[in-house]
Amino acid sequence: MHPPVRLGVRIAVLLALAVLPALTGALDQPFLLDLALRIMILATAAVSLNLILGYGGMISFGHAAYIGIGAYAVGIPAYYGEYSGYVQLPLAIGAGALFALVTGYICLRTKGVYFIMITLAFAQMAYFAFVSIEEYGGDDGLVIEQRSEFTGIIDMESTHQFYYVVLVFLVGALYLVSRIVNARFGMAVQGAKDNDQRMQSLGFDTFRYRLACYVIAGAMAAAAGWLMGNYNYFFSPEMMGWTHSGELIFMVVLGGAGSLFGPLYGAIVLIILEEQLSSATVYWPLILGAILIAVVLFARGGLEGMLAKLERRK
Amino acid sequence: MNAPLLETRGLSKAFGGITATEGVDLDVGEGKIHAVIGPNGAGKTTLIAQLAGMLAPDSGRIIFAGRDITRLPTHARARLGIARSFQITSIFHAMSVLDNTLLAVQAHDGHSYRFWRRARRDKRLTGPAMAALEQVGLGHKAASNASGLSHGEHRQLEIAMALAGASKLLLLDEPMAGMGAEESARMVVLLRGLKETKSILLIEHDMDVVFALADRITVMVDGKAIASGKPEQIRADENVRRAYLGMEGPGETIGDA
Ligand SMILES: Nc1ncnc2c1ncn2[C@@H]1O[C@H](COP(=O)(O)OP(=O)(O)OP(=O)(O)O)[C@@H](O)[C@H]1O
Ligand SMILES: [Mg+2]
């Protein structure tokens, strides 16, 4: 028996995230909580990207659009005085799913580099659409006065409570993806990634399974966007920008595309690196770029892949 | 006689200037093994690709179980009961051997919008998937990575995937090519045993295999079906010998090597 390295790391990371609020209180380091919140929210989005990119082979370069959509689903109702989380969260998920359904229907008719470009194009269209709406602040965006309300159940204004809401979303996303990829649906999606022609000759309408997968991922990412809007008290088109979509891809690839926890590890490492490097040097994007190239060239499976190797070696 | 399970009428397909199939009429009877033979480039694979829906014919019709399927997409034909094996192995390399046949079973067990239960623990999938592997002699490799198999084992897996779906019609494109003699012999026995439940369109270069198995044979040359009939008729057909087996000496008959 090999020591279960991967399982051990998974449990350790989740435990660390679970006890962090207590620790930061004791150490008087509130900025750590802030960092962990950002990591968990982006990791949730990266987990959803991994579902289509890692398991489904659909390299979307427009995933940040859903984060923006989710944030606007907090901000626009709030602008009109509607703060209920029971309105905002379903609105975010519904809008994300709808955007994925409409754009996916078109994107998924293309393959390879065309797919990448067209997902990027749709995200940019969403970006410019919101830039043009002066009512909601144009390209400056708007401040959100208060977080989503779940009166009597959760107080999202409480940092600790909000923290655990975010953690539940992250763990929920991980669990959902683990169920999906091992269920029949996930087998169909992974088969279509591996050999589309063979899947069709077996009797799978691969286009539809891909589209369904794309919609699920869009809905999940929009839920992450709903968290992001609440976290920032702010929304703007900039959240949909292609550099953010690139960051999400970076997280997935760095952590290990097609591995369950890879996106979380990728988010942790990328955001901490960004934090450290950006205060040390203005050339930090260069260093990040070099790291990404190294991962692609020398560690195809990303961080999860390295852990798996460790597991086999011992 | 009953209507044939599969009929083609005037099936034609050209690639630019090359006519790959031209006016092919074919009848595959229920429970029969129908062999298609012909030299390299005769258009056999192109014929199968049109039957399976991967290539659209330029003209002609395809009727399966009484239904015109000429315009039906590949996956819809597969769900009606047409399974195909590929001359150039086409499997799921990133998956285990069992996953490969499991997907073939899953394709025929209702829709796959099932998001929760683990597919690999579902006996309705693993049972028939394992059985198909046993049938071709790959049971012991079920847990291996598909990419790690030998060339001959890949060919066996290719057949297992066609068998696993419980289809009515198998389109087998040179299933034995690349197999060792022992596996090849095993396949002959296996295919003969399938006749109870399935019809088979078999493309095969090995004449011993063809004459051991076929109920009917169609000979293709340059895209045309130049002869079609019982094995004895084909063996005796002058046209066939001239066009296809010009290399055979006088007095020698096809297939009794
Ligand atoms: N996609 C394609 N594009 C252009 N020409 C093609 C294509 N596929 C097949 N051909 C041509 O059509 C003709 C028939 O090819 P096909 O593969 O159907 O022959 P075959 O009878 O299966 O031969 P073999 O016994 O070698 O497998 C050949 O001349 C081939 O070069
Ligand atoms: Mg061929």
Image: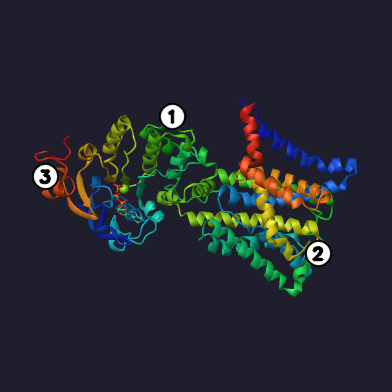
Q: Nearer the viewer, residue B30 or A63?
A: A63
Classify A66 as above or below A300: below
Classify A39 as above or below B212: below
**Element under disc 3:** helix
Residue A40 percent location from the top left of the image: 74, 48
* Number of dots carrying numbers: 3
Q: Given contact means CB atoms under 8 Å apart, are the residues at marks 1 and 3 in contact?
A: no
| Residue type, numbered disc 3 | Ala
Q: Nearer the viewer, mark 2 or mark 1?
A: 1
Residue A144, numbered circle:
2
Could you confirm whether marks 2 and 1 are on the same chain? no
Colour scheme of the rendered structure: rainbow
| Placement of the C terminus of chain A among the 4 image quadrants | top right
Q: Is residue A165 visible from the viewing direction of this image?
A: no
| Residue type, numbered disc 1 | His
Q: Chain of mark 1?
A: B
Residue drawn at x 49%, y 37% is B96
Q: Nearer the viewer, mark 2 or mark 3?
A: 3
Q: Residues within 10 Å of mark 3 (few under 14, many from 20)?
A: few
Q: Which residue is mark 1?
A: B140
State left or right for residue A192 relative to residue A134. left
Residue A206 percent location from the top left of the image: 48, 54
Q: Chain of mark 2?
A: A
Q: Residues within 10 Å of mark 2 (few under 14, many from 20)?
A: many
| Placement of the N terminus of chain A among the 4 image quadrants | top right
Q: Residues within 10 Å of mark 1 (few under 14, many from 20)?
A: few
Residue B236, numbered circle:
3
**Element under disc 2:** loop
Residue drawn at x 62%, y 33% is A309
Spatial distance from mark 2 to mark 1, Cα to Cα? 61 Å
Quadrant of the image occupied by residue B255:
top left
Q: Nearer the viewer, residue A295 or A208?
A: A295
